[in-house]
Amino acid sequence: MRILLVEDEPDLGAAIQRVLKREKYIVDRVQNGSEAWDYLDQKWIQYTLAIFDWMLPGLSGIELCQHLRQRHVALPILILTAKDRIEDRVAGLDAGADDYLVKPFGMAELLARIRALQRRSPQIQPQQLQVGNLSLDYGKHTAYCQQAETQQPITLTAKEFQVLEYFMRRPGQVITSEQLVHQLWEVGTEPTSNAVAAQIRLLRRKLAEVGYDKLIETVYGMGYRFNDADAPQ
């Protein structure tokens, strides 16, 4: 799950980003509404949730909401603000926000609001993703393979989990290294293509340990493909 966080208070923004990354989210953080719009307008990045502060340099959080809704973009949006009047909350929701969190707030409540948006928004991942005998549990950040009557856990790093999820959502499709870089690494921290290949190699090794040795195929000169038909039954 990739989140765009737009917060112009550096300390608060950094604190929120740390908490979200600890929860295995991919987070791009900016402090300016106009820069945020540039991120949202990039065709090669697909966000699954946005968190906007109301008062921002450039475009405000409310203006960002309005621009997205005018384009009929259904991206779930959470507004952060010190404005706590009923009229302000109504204005934020009417502008297109899906939820509203008043400052100061606890990080536990922020995470609960995000989970609530996940449950309400069909375009965001469910609590589990199942492809054949392989499943991902988002609550536990763990992969499982069904073997006979038991589920065998597969211990993955945060990035391995994200890479596997990306493939499982696109079975049979050829995925390039560039697609993985653009979607699974934060802007400004893009790795080299060798780093992507190394991540795939480590993931393959862990999948092979539970019998999924041919699940991720190299398509030479193009990229990689997730072959769910090759999963053990």
Image: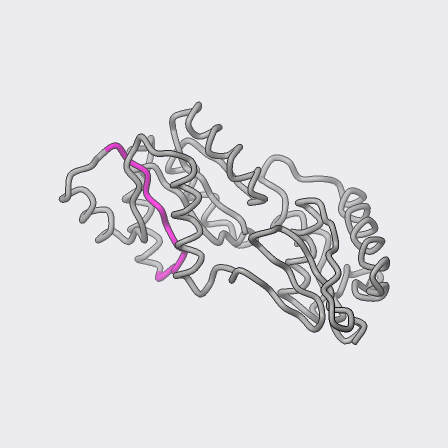
Would residue 132 appear left or right of 88 to someone viewing this image? right
Which residue ends up furthest to the top in the rendered image? Answer: 11
Seen in the picture, residue 170 relative to 229 is either above or below; the reply is above
The residue positioned 68% from the left and 69% from the top of the image is 171
Q: Nearer the viewer, residue 107 or 98?
A: 107
Q: Which colour style is shown?
A: one colour
Would residue 187 appear left or right of 50 to someone viewing this image? right
Q: Is residue 80 magenta?
A: yes
Give percent across and percent down for residue 233: 79, 76
Give percent across and percent down for residue 79: 32, 43
Q: Is residue 131 magenta?
A: no
| Quadrant position of residue 60 | top left
Give percent across and percent down for residue 97: 30, 51
The residue positioned 39% from the left and 33% from the top of the image is 7
Seen in the picture, residue 205 relative to 192 is either above or below; the reply is below
Give percent across and percent down for residue 13: 44, 30
Query: Where does the magenta region start and end?
Result: 72-82
Q: Nearer the viewer, residue 71 or 157?
A: 157
| Quadrant position of residue 69 | bottom left
| Quadrant position of residue 119 | bottom left
The residue positioned 85% from the left and 62% from the top of the image is 220
Count of numbered tags: 0
The residue positioned 47% from the left and 29% from the top of the image is 15
